[in-house]
Image (cartoon, grey):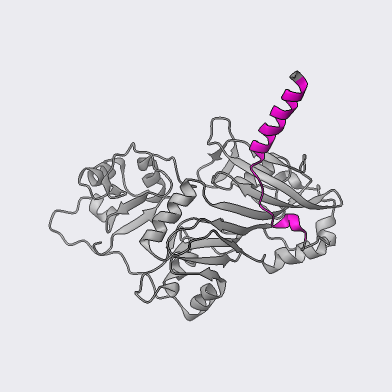
């Protein structure tokens, strides 16, 4: 790979976008005409192949971004040496200690982190400190920097997997795309879900360009979440387990809000929760942060691991304090039990009912 070339992997939250629209979002300074020039010259590639602006991106594909793409697109003449991308800053001792302290599990293929709330996974406008920028501190003996394969929201804590090698990156991207990864989240909701166990099949789409917010939209992308109520407190707050079967932006937060049971501490989706907890939160002095935690992840066998691997992340201090304040039983077996595919169970129950009704 030539110096300065960037390879960006499309995660499941970015999937099903046209290539030109993805570029407009991530490289807004490149005009449509400039993008076409880069595509025609083969400088931009998808999984190593030439691409068209109308191509739809799938989760797991790798997009090649040429060095200093903006400068090249703005008409640099052939043969002119373009300045290389600025090299990433060296990881500070403080950040190196921080990310090393996040490690829950590692082997020759992967590293699993327990991301704290409030820390972004990737950089962006006004975001200078993030997981991706700290990953060089976890480089192997060959100096290869681990690669991100999925993301968590800034305010969501918990399990985050990074790949040590390009082969592991491809295997993990395939596993996410083919839904071979089973995820389990913990959340505290304001209000009690009914039924206590079930699923939400509600399409979502982005509303607004500046402050990204996902809302119910029957013309949007399909989004499915299975859930289980673990325990409830005073019929006003509940500890729930959530299993996203699709990977839409803010899916769990948007689905809980759409059901009228937003996640505690969610300032983006919790507007309708005013007064629902009737002062219980204030009385218990619950921390104000988002109570959403990526509790565990089941990894399929690949590479050097011959068996399925499950990694569990303990909740952050504030989340654990809330569970304790609400007197929830942390040893409740329902908390970590895998959630079955509720839609399949529902269909089987309907079949059994109809069979009994019409026999």
Is residue 156 visible from the viewing direction of this image? no
Callout count: 0
Please give the name of the residue rendered at 69% of the width and 52% of the height, measured from the top-left corner.
Answer: 241
Q: Which residues are magenta?
A: 332-357
Viewer-closest of 64 and 105: 105
Picture quadrant of residue 58: top left
* Residue 44 drawn above or below residue 147: above
Q: In the current view of this chain or complex, which residue is farthest to the right? A: 234
Which quarter of the rendered picture does the C terminus lie within? top right
Q: Position of residue 153 (x, y in %)?
A: 56, 56
Residue 342's spot in the image, x, y percent? 67, 40
Relative placement, left or right, of 54 versus 114 is left
Q: Was residue 306 drawn as part of the magenta stretch in this picture?
A: no
Confirm whether the magenta stretch covers residue 339: yes
Seen in the picture, residue 96 relative to 176 is either above or below; the reply is below
Res. 197 visible in picture: yes
Residue reaching furthest to the left: 79
Judged left or right of residue 148, residue 187 is right
Q: Residue at x 42, y 55 (%)?
A: 171
With 150 as the anchor, is 231 left or right in this view?
right
Residue at position x 71%, y 66% in the image: 318
Residue at 76% across, 24% down: 356
Q: 4 or 80: nearer the eye?
A: 4
State the residue in front, 261 or 212. 261
Q: Residue furthest top?
A: 358
Q: Position of residue 189 (x, y in %)?
A: 74, 50
Magenta stretch: dominant secondary structure: helix
- Seen from this angle, which residue lies furthest front? 359
Residue 326 x, y percent position in the rendering: 82, 60
């Amino acid at each position: 790979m030539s110096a300065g070339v960037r390879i960006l992997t499309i995660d499941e939250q970015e999937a099903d976008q046209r290539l030109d629209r993805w570029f407009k979002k991530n490289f807004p300074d490149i005009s449509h005409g400039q993008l076409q020039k880069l595509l025609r010259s083969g400088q931009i590639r998808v999984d190593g192949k030439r691409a068209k602006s109308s191509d739809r991106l799938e989760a797991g594909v790798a997009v090649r971004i040429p060095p200093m793409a903006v400068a090249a697109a703005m008409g640099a003449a052939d043969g002119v040496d373009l300045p290389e991308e600025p090299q990433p800053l060296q990881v500070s001792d403080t950040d190196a200690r921080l990310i090393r302290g996040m490690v829950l599990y590692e082997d020759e293929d992967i590293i699993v982190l327990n991301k704290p709330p409030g820390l972004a996974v990737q950089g962006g406008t006004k975001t200078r400190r993030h997981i991706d920028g700290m990953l060089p501190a976890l480089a192997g003996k060959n100096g290869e920097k681990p690669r991100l394969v999925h993301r968590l929201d800034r305010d969501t804590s918990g399990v985050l997997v990074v790949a040590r090698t390009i082969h592991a990156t491809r295997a993990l991207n395939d596993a996410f795309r083919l839904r071979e990864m089973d995820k389990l989240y913990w959340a505290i909701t304001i209000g009690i879900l009914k039924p206590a166990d079930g699923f939400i099949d509600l399409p979502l789409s982005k509303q607004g360009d500046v402050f990204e917010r996902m809302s119910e939209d029957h013309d949007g992308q399909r989004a499915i979440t299975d859930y289980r109520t673990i325990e409830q407190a005073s019929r006003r707050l509940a500890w729930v387990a959530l299993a996203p079967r699709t990977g839409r932006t803010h899916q769990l937060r948007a689905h809980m809000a759409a059901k009228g049971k937003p996640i505690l501490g969610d300032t983006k989706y919790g507007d309708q929760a005013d007064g629902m907890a009737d002062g219980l939160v204030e009385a218990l002095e619950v921390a104000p942060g988002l109570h959403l935690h990526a509790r565990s992840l089941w990894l399929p066998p690949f590479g050097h691991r011959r068996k399925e691997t499950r990694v569990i992340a303990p909740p952050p201090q504030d989340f654990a304090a809330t569970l304790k304040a609400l007197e929830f039983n942390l040893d409740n077996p329902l908390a970590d039990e895998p959630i079955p595919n509720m839609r399949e169970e529902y269909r089987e129950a309907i079949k059994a009912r109809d069979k009994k009704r019409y026999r």
